[in-house]
Amino acid sequence: MDQIVNSGDSDNHLQSETTLKSVCRSCHGGCGVHLHVKDGLLVNVTGDPDSPLNKGRLCPIGAATMDLVYHPDRLKYPMKRKPPRGSGEWERISWDDALGEIAERLQSIKEEFGAESIAMGTGTGRHHIRWVSRFGHALGTPNWCEPGFAQCFHPRVNTSIQTMGDFPVCDFTGDVGPECIIYWGHNPVNSGPDGETRFNVRDSLAYKPKIIVIDPRETYLAKKADLWLQLRPGTDDALALAMLNVVIFEKLYDEEFVTKWTHGFTELAERVKDMPPEWAQDITWVPADKIREAARLYARTNPSMMEWGCAIEHTPACIQTIRAISMLPVLTGNIDVPGGWVFGMHGLGRFPSLIENLSEEMNAKRLGADRFKMLCGEGADLPAAHIPTLLQAMREGKPYPVKAFLVFGNNTLTTYANTSLVYESLMNLDFMVCADLFMTPTAELSDIVLPAASWPEIDQVAGMPTIAANVVLAQQKAVQIGECKSDEEIFVELARRMNLDSCTESVQDVLDQMVGDGLGITFDELRGEGFVQVPFKYRKYETDGFKTPTGKIELYSTRLEAMGYDPLPYYEEPPESPVATPELAEKFPLVLTTGGRIPFFFNSEHRQLRQLRKAHPEPVAEIHPETAADLGIEDGEWMSIETSRGKIKQKAKLTFGIDPRVIHAEHGWWFPEGKAPEYGVWDSNANVLTSNLPPYDPAMGTYQLRALQCKVAKI
Ligand SMILES: Nc1nc2c(c(=O)[nH]1)N[C@H]1C(S)=C(S)[C@@H](COP(=O)(O)OP(=O)(O)OC[C@H]3O[C@@H](n4cnc5c(=O)[nH]c(N)nc54)[C@H](O)[C@@H]3O)O[C@H]1N2
Ligand SMILES: Nc1nc2c(c(=O)[nH]1)N[C@H]1C(S)=C(S)[C@@H](COP(=O)(O)OP(=O)(O)OC[C@H]3O[C@@H](n4cnc5c(=O)[nH]c(N)nc54)[C@H](O)[C@@H]3O)O[C@H]1N2
Ligand code: SF4
Ligand SMILES: [Mo]
């Protein structure tokens, strides 16, 4: 799938070109790129051969950047919708009028209902994600949200910070290779997210590590694996607890590390003592022998990496599943060691989120704060609102009304669970604004749309230790498209126009501050370099300890206990399952999982880019040939997928790589070529099928996206 893109159309071209070193932000990966500019135009985007993250390569999405930047459907100027909401009729307005009207409407809503009645929404892993909260905090509202904060990546971040004081990433850029890698609910050769690029993942295979894959589907990595554990979706907690049982009771752990550097080993052993592989076998559908073999192989092969993905975070058992899984590298001492799990070097200063602007009373008003402390309160690195609670406040005005929603880079109708309820909530708003690259079914519901600049049109920095353990990268503006503005610039202009006390500094000032605090240079100096590798130090805990109350890794979490949550991991059956809801399972007999990533689209994006769409023209759902035969469904035929919430269609892909009792549906589907204003958002969108109703993870508020009951039929 990976493609190397060569630079330049012709030698002549190259001679008069300027090249800017930048970083691709079409996914979270952070590949180094060269932006080739000629006469004010971007003429090519190529991989930076010097970048340790991609070594000159680009994936299909990165290689389609020219198509993205110059796509004829890009939003190029602000627009205002004619009434009523969702009419699909728009007129062009000036930036001055757009910002003026937004400022005026927000001011009057704030005066009448309080700042908390204005919510901010954003999407996955963007350059500006933290600027959304910054503007919200400057405005005085605690209610900003992002689908990932309860469902993706941030549960891993927050849980790791509580458990071990920092967030571990795989040591892909060091000199020592891994001897063993577990891919747990994670398919990084397609997704390459949060902590590495898909190229590092492929390169690490050259070390010929032992590979263990834990996935209901037979992925590319599962085919290469020494052991593939094909578990029932949503039962990762039981599997992890059984593996811990083996590691502990067969004494496969690193005794010295455990004694010196962990807290609560005895309590953990007590918790898992009745959870051997034989117990987990019936729950997970993985034979006990295989669970035992996986635990032994992992524990005996060092150094090892834990590659974990968002599949473990898409359930109401999210926090404890993450905790249980993270204890495998901890017990085997694979923490901050070469070729293992390491803590990044924090090459950037802290982002000024302006959360200090919020009073204690305002923080307490954050929707969800009364329940989900790891998402909305003291257990969160950057607290955010709980999405289902926020949507309810839009619909029902309870516990207080939310009247306005400013969406910067999120396709709410396709990527939040339970599309019907989301639609009802958005339709009930008084005022909605969307900043996006394209008109989407979500943007169609807003009052004003703003044209956002894409990543080659923006100055920024990337370099959380979570993106790459030790690299800080400059993202550089190479081109101006229409009247597009970066989200960051929009926030600064809006803050100035509303006479807010903060968020009025220029973007450059904030970048200078972050780069200066981290590296001691200015943003312009970083620009010249393209990226800076921060010298790496292993086993930092030997001098500093772990940043937890006990100074150790807390298997027994004193912080979770203090917040009122279980300090030890446990198993919980998915809310909809053949075990939990047998009557429902009679009507909807198959287990549905959603959202396994494909290399050609990023969530709901890129469906309008010709070469990517050609590679993957339609939504595809995986089904076992026996199940398909029973239902008379043939390979490549449209089939319906139905849950108690709704029905969609996707094309059947028959594969022996999925259990006969399981269906996998792609997420994020809408059809930009379809009829406005809906663009087929009800036809094939997996979230028509999912639920955002309780139960939620008690600490994180997470809902279920990966284990639901469904039925399928031939169309
Ligand atoms: N059923 C199901 N649902 C899921 C998932 C699943 O696995 N299954 N995965 C969930 C996960 S993990 C996540 S993170 C979410 C992601 O959900 P979203 O955050 O909605 O993700 P995207 O579709 O990538 O991006 C949304 C919009 O941002 C726009 N955009 C891109 N760049 C910019 C920019 O620079 N500025 C602005 N203003 N807009 C920009 C795009 O055009 C797009 O319309 O989906 C979640 N939804
Ligand atoms: N090309 C591309 N890259 C992306 C994205 C994209 O849409 N396209 N999205 C980005 C985002 S927002 C995210 S969060 C990451 C996600 O990227 P990953 O973390 O890799 O997650 P997925 O690919 O969604 O799922 C990984 C695997 O989990 C399996 N799975 C499904 N249900 C279960 C389960 O219950 N348990 C276990 N153990 N496995 C299960 C799926 O079969 C799939 O192979 O990728 C990011 N990168
Ligand atoms: S992996 Fe991500 S960062 Fe790298 S080229 Fe592809 S889209 Fe860009
Ligand atoms: Mo995500």
Image (spheres, rainbow, N blue to C red):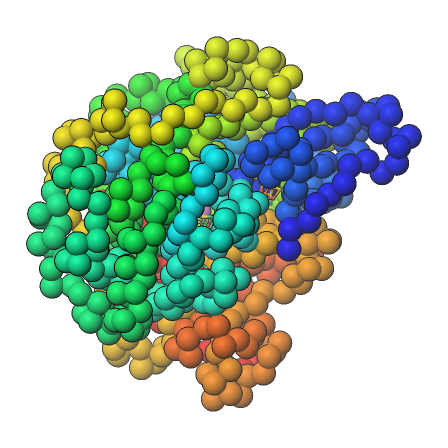
Quadrant where the N terminus lies? Answer: bottom right
- At 54% from the left and 53% from the top, the residue drawn is 190
The outermost residue toward the right is 12
- At 73% from the left and 43% from the top, the residue drawn is 5
- At 67% from the left and 63% from the top, the residue drawn is 617
Q: Which sits in the foreground, 225 or 326? A: 225
Residue 326 lies, with reference to residue 552, above or below; the image says below
Query: Does the rendering let one see residue 312?
Result: yes
Residue 451 drawn at (x, y percent) = 63, 34
Quadrant of the rendered structure where residue 654 is? Answer: bottom right
Residue 585 drawn at (x, y percent) = 31, 77
- At 68% from the left and 49% from the top, the residue drawn is 3
Residue 410 drawn at (x, y percent) = 51, 43
Does 556 sit left or right of 8 as displayed?
Answer: left
Residue 274 drawn at (x, y percent) = 11, 63
The mark tally for this picture is: 0
Query: Does the rendering let one see residue 117?
Result: no
Q: Which sits in the foreground, 712 or 338? A: 338
